[in-house]
Amino acid sequence: MLEHDWHKKVREEIFQKLQPNAYSSHSEISKLELYRDSVKRQNCLSDADIVVFDPISKKIMQIIEIETQINPKKIIGIVLATHLCSFCRIKKENHLLDNISLKIVYKKSVQGSKKDMKLEVIKQPLKEIIANTKGCLSDFAFEEHD
């Protein structure tokens, strides 16, 4: 699948700012796959755009997803699929996911659009699910980008 121009530009911009403490899909790594329970093909629930790690411990601290459109169903799927995952596979190494922050960067809506309001509708219920269920996420945030 071809990467959308805006998605690519934003991913590269964020990735460059985080260097050398990040991995990016679509770069030297083909995919940053996220797995539930064990690293088996049938357990792969998602993949990440960018993974940020602690430079000393190499522990994954944050996962960044970049979305060109605000679609509540897709955003809910990203948050919950990520929360259900236990491992991220990077360069043929498995990294445990625990106490991770998820950031979803999305394209700024046209002026007057009500799309941003949709994020507010789903934000609190998702935070409650994360707080009350076992999973890898400790928090998530939305970030608008030009």
Image: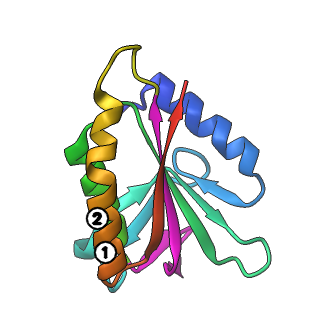
Residue closer to the observer: 121 or 12: 121
The local crowd at label 2, few if under 14, some if 14 to 19, many if 20 or more residues have their Cα within 10 Å, is some
Instruction: Report the amino acid beneath label 2.
Output: Leu
Residue at 39 percent across and 58 percent down: it is 47
Q: Quadrant of the C terminus?
A: top right
Residue at 57 percent across and 39 percent down: it is 11
Determine which quarter of the picture holds residue 106: top left
- On the image, the x and y values in percent for residue 31 come to 46, 56
Q: Which mark is residue 67?
A: none
| Residue 70 appears in view | no
The local crowd at label 1, few if under 14, some if 14 to 19, many if 20 or more residues have their Cα within 10 Å, is many
Instruction: Report the amino acid beneath label 1.
Output: Leu
Would residue 61 appear left or right of 72 to someone viewing this image? right
| Residue 9 appears in view | yes
- C-beta proximity under 8 Å, tags 1 and 2: yes
Asked which secondary structure carries label 2, the reply is helix
- On the image, the x and y values in percent for residue 43 come to 26, 75
- On the image, the x and y values in percent for residue 69 come to 33, 31
Residue closer to the observer: 47 or 77: 77
Determine which quarter of the picture holds residue 131: bottom left
Would residue 122 appear left or right of 83 to someone viewing this image? left
* Tally of numbered discs: 2
Q: Read off the magenta span.
A: 86-107
Residue closer to the observer: 47 or 139: 139
Residue 115, compared with residue 113, is above or below; it is: below
The residue identified by callout 1 is 84
Residue at 28 percent across and 71 percent down: it is 129
The residue identified by callout 2 is 80
Whether 101 is among the magenta residues is yes
Separation (CA) of disc 1 from disc 2? 6 Å
Would residue 126 appear left or right of 92 to someone viewing this image? left
Residue closer to the observer: 137 or 89: 137
